[in-house]
Amino acid sequence: MPRLTVYHVTPTWRLPLIEEEGLRTRTDLSDRYGPPGPEDVAAPGVYAHGRRVSAYLHLDHARQQAAEHGRGLVSFTVDPRKAIGVPGSAREQGGYWAAARPLHEWLTGEPPHDLEVHQPVPVRTKHVTIHRPLLGADALGAFAPLVEAVADEDRLSAKALMHLAIIASGGDVDSAAFQAAAALAYRDESDPPSILRELVELDPDKVASAALAGYGGTAPEAARTLRQALESTRGWADQEGLDHGQGLLVRSASVLEELTGTVR
């Protein structure tokens, strides 16, 4: 039986961690990695105590859960013979785990639209696809026109502005700047492997500056915020003895390291 693609929704701030380490154990459909709650403890056998990775069978149903579980979207594949499925409606009816059946049994007919899929092993990074976050203009705020103009049209500029937006967010994962960084970073089409090397060779500071000059008019307020972050980062890089391009990458990485370090 062929492997099946399933979809997992999570807060956007988790996406860098997922990109780095994949979906690890104790990853469920909640907005946290652990510790396990009562429902986790009640799970059968190897699925107990949160030792599982969970997802939704249908993409459109996964999208409907974003408001509750997060607007980051990833997908991976499961072996239907090694996973179980439970209708989401069973949560409201009680006895959730009693409704569990091997996933391949659900697939012999028309599986429930709200089927939740669980497997008891981690998903490695190389098998995880990170998709465009499920972010609307309300979440992106003043950054929405900039994301619209750049994200799919100019990936090199988008990557440079992503680093600036991370810095501008100051690690505030609920800010429009951080949401914009996620929207600029992750798209439905994967970036070419050479894009990071190209960004470094061209100098991230210069690429970011040119991107603000070229696209800043689409979102003046957001552009001002990013220019302030750029100037601040240049000053920080000078103090640290780094060139401006290197300083941009190092400073954005430090924000993410502090953020992801809290959930390791």
Image (tube, rainbow, N blue to C red):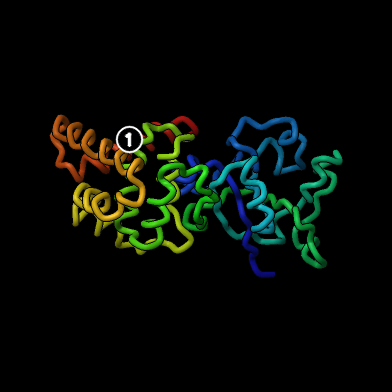
Nearest the camera: 31 or 42? 31
Q: Position of residue 243 (x, y in %)?
A: 14, 42
Nearest the camera: 149 or 55? 149
Image point (44%, 48%), residue name: 144
Judged from this view, the residue extending furthest toward the bottom is 1
Image quarter where the N terminus lies is: bottom right
Relative to 128, residue 247 above or below: above
Q: Position of residue 139 (x, y in %)?
A: 51, 42
Image point (70%, 55%), residue name: 83
Q: How many marks?
A: 1
Nearest the camera: 49 or 88? 88
Nearest the camera: 230 or 263? 230
Q: Position of residue 84 (x, y in %)?
A: 74, 53
Image point (57%, 56%), residue name: 75
Looking at the rendering, which quadrant does residue 93 occupy?
top right
Is 29 on the left or on the right of 108, as rendered?
A: left
Looking at the rendering, which quadrant does residue 253 occupy?
top left
Image point (75%, 42%), residue name: 45
Q: How many C-alpha atoms fall within 10 Å of the one at disc 1: few (<14), some, or many (≥20)?
A: some
Is 207 on the left or on the right of 57, as rendered?
A: left
Type of the residue with mark 1: Ser
Disc 1 is placed on an element classified as: helix
Q: Position of residue 110 (x, y in %)?
A: 81, 65
* Residue assigned mark 1: 254
Looking at the rendering, which quadrant does residue 112 occupy?
bottom right
